Image: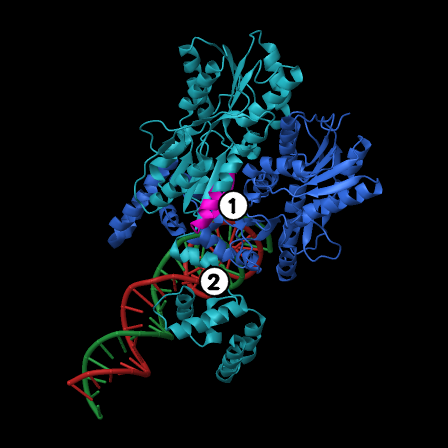
Chain colours: A cyan, B blue, C red, D green
Amino acid sequence: MAGNEDQTMDKSLEGQGLGEETQLSESAKQHVRTLADLARLAGVSAGTVSRALAGKALVNAETRDRIQALARHHGFKPNQMASKLRTGRTGVIGVVIPLGHEKRQTISDPFFLTLLGHLADELTESGYDLMLSRAIPDGTADWLERITSSGMVDGIIVIGQSDQFHVIERVAQSYRPMVAWGHYRSGQAHCAVGTDNELGGRIAVEHLVASGARNIAFLGQTGGIEIATRYRGAAMAAEAANATFVHLPVELADAAMGPQIEQVLAGTDLPIDGIVAASDLIAMSALRVLHEMGRAVPGEVRIVGFDDLPLAAQTTPPLTTIRQEIAEGARALVERLRTRIEGRPTQSLVMPPRLVVRQTTRS
Amino acid sequence: MAGNEDQTMDKSLEGQGLGEETQLSESAKQHVRTLADLARLAGVSAGTVSRALAGKALVNAETRDRIQALARHHGFKPNQMASKLRTGRTGVIGVVIPLGHEKRQTISDPFFLTLLGHLADELTESGYDLMLSRAIPDGTADWLERITSSGMVDGIIVIGQSDQFHVIERVAQSYRPMVAWGHYRSGQAHCAVGTDNELGGRIAVEHLVASGARNIAFLGQTGGIEIATRYRGAAMAAEAANATFVHLPVELADAAMGPQIEQVLAGTDLPIDGIVAASDLIAMSALRVLHEMGRAVPGEVRIVGFDDLPLAAQTTPPLTTIRQEIAEGARALVERLRTRIEGRPTQSLVMPPRLVVRQTTRS
DNA sequence: CCGGATCGAGCAATGGATTGCAGGTATCCA
DNA sequence: TGGATACCTGCAATCCATTGCTCGATCCGG
């Protein structure tokens, strides 16, 4: 049907085309590249084709259907660049992961990747594409501004503030459509969605203490603001409970993590009986190291992780952890970003962490 | 210095501007949005500014530096859409994950996410941006063609063929700049980079047999072609070694995996003493389930995973697994894609898998 | 002192879709 | 049959950077 009509159109065209005949029939048979090409085939103007493909009510329903069928038949899609240039909307959201305090960290960090997955879900459903950028901060705000001013994105989601809080803050002064996953400080300019890390740290230590731990270690680097806050909460809870509390810095580099944990655990003369890890991944490594050292979990040492990634339920034994609502957070990020894109104001969201008790703290 | 010059320019402009004076000085002070704006400030034409910012030798070095300084000072970046429309290059590579046989699988699958991370690294270094698309195949090739014909990307990387091998194959006939991670069939049209899954499956079973296993189970769904191939290799090796071999299907949905494994393991009356898992994640779950069932690993049951993700080294006990070279694969994908974008032909790459022996098969 | 070479900069066309406004046609009613 | 109304469709400007070609100026050697 469509093909038939196509033929007819083509012929009538040739009849009128005269001098341009061969060129036209050639390009028509070859490939339809532009609105104008399709317009010629359909015997209408480019403007009408544009309206028809956009499904506007302004064109006759019959004409619209005919043009849409023709477009489908030729596999034609309007050039996105031209469209985006004209409309000023790109339909793309930039997702940036600043690799701040630890260059090797985030790219394979399961937490960020999990969040990324959920963001992909949410954005796709909202009709946006997702452009992923890794950014390696160089001391200036350039890594962010390069994206805001690229004209390529309608908005930006920053995953993790790392040690770049001030940069995000500064950019937020002039660039509205941006939200960040991470820490919230009262009075800050940028819209943030995240977990109450301090409370999370506190809950973790309180649970350890309740499980009988007296000598508690915090495992992880406190370079990024999120983890530093968890540390603070943990330290406060330990002090309140009169428990001993030490900080054992561990980098998140996958390969080196095991040996490092071994080293810091051996390096302290404190009889550690409770560990709060900065992330589930660290907790998982600690679990293995302790197993190899012959120290029973949770018998001798109790462990609490952070994040509640899917893998936390699959460790041996399954990991007690502080849950962050990642899926909900992703939804909140996208919803707030869309609100900001529309020019309306938004509020930051601080989600409560939740203790998930599994096997590493059962006594 | 730059600011000074700017002022001067502005004033001389106002002197010339006459009727347009207020409007011009307004927009100049407000914000520089287009090449033309900057050109006015610099007292040159838009074309010159374009060339200057592109660093072309055609403009006087002094003028070029002046314009660049001015652009920096005003935080001006040329509109990407206009540029891309004009040049026909987008500088964006689409990365697509077809969610084929298991809708819930890939989005949080650590393997794909790890590969994605490495791709982000490689593409960034090559000066490309990465646009991420999830695609839910609907029986037609539309999910892929929507991206190829969007005009938004210079090329496409498909992560995992899933059950969409034929779709990729068909699109590859007419769309050149595309490469896929996954299985290679001799004579196929599309360029693929992947691991020899059959060999991997074989090596896994051979190693299990050598470790003393006689009753071997394959844990995992064989809906996707990659895993089906691993299964085939494993089955062949088992037959060659005269070992008993069963297939226990397990979905990759995170939450349900543990109970499922428990169920299938309990459901078979075979005294399983060797497990080859379709992925490290499944192996990790199996490890935990067996631990809970009170069956010793590797004493009673030996386990081999697949992928060698970072977490494989951190399980308790550390996982013996079949390593895929993910970083190298990412590099190969990007290199081949660039070659194809340049119009040159490429060859598929089948990388050999490598057995990494850790603790789950030591006897 | 003049012609040619050389370097630098401007002009204007180009890429392709979108959209406000003007104009045309058909339908329908008086 | 004339005129009005509603409904379509076409025209042309617009979004903004890029680049081939042209023109002008400066400088050098003859």
The three-letter code of the residue at mark 1 reads: Gly
Q: CA distance from mark 2 to mark 1?
A: 32 Å
Q: Residues at marks 2 and 1, common chain?
A: no
Residue that numbered label 1 is attached to: B55
Look at the numbered disc 2 and give the secondary structure of its residue.
loop
Chain ID for label 1?
A: B
In contact (CB < 8 Å): disc 2 and disc 1: no
| Residue A127 magenta | yes
Residue under the image location 51 percent in, 34 percent down: A112
Left-right relation of B237 to A289: right
Q: Residues within 10 Å of mark 2 (few under 14, many from 20)?
A: some
Chain ID for label 2?
A: A
Please say whether residue B79 is visible from this viewpoint: no
Residue that numbered label 2 is attached to: A78
In which quarter of the view is residue C26 placed?
Answer: bottom left
Bounds of the magenta span? Answer: A119-134
Q: Residues within 10 Å of mark 1 (few under 14, many from 20)?
A: some
Residue under the image location 55 percent in, 25 percent down: A319
Residue under the image location 49 percent in, 10 percent down: A214
Is A139 in front, or is A351? A351
Residue under the image location 60 percent in, 41 percent down: B252
The percent coordinates of residue A290 (x first, y second) are 62, 17
Is B65 in front, or is A62? A62
The percent coordinates of residue B65 (x first, y second) are 46, 41
The percent coordinates of residue A64 (x first, y second) are 41, 71
| Residue B252 magenta | no
The percent coordinates of residue A114 (x first, y second) are 52, 37
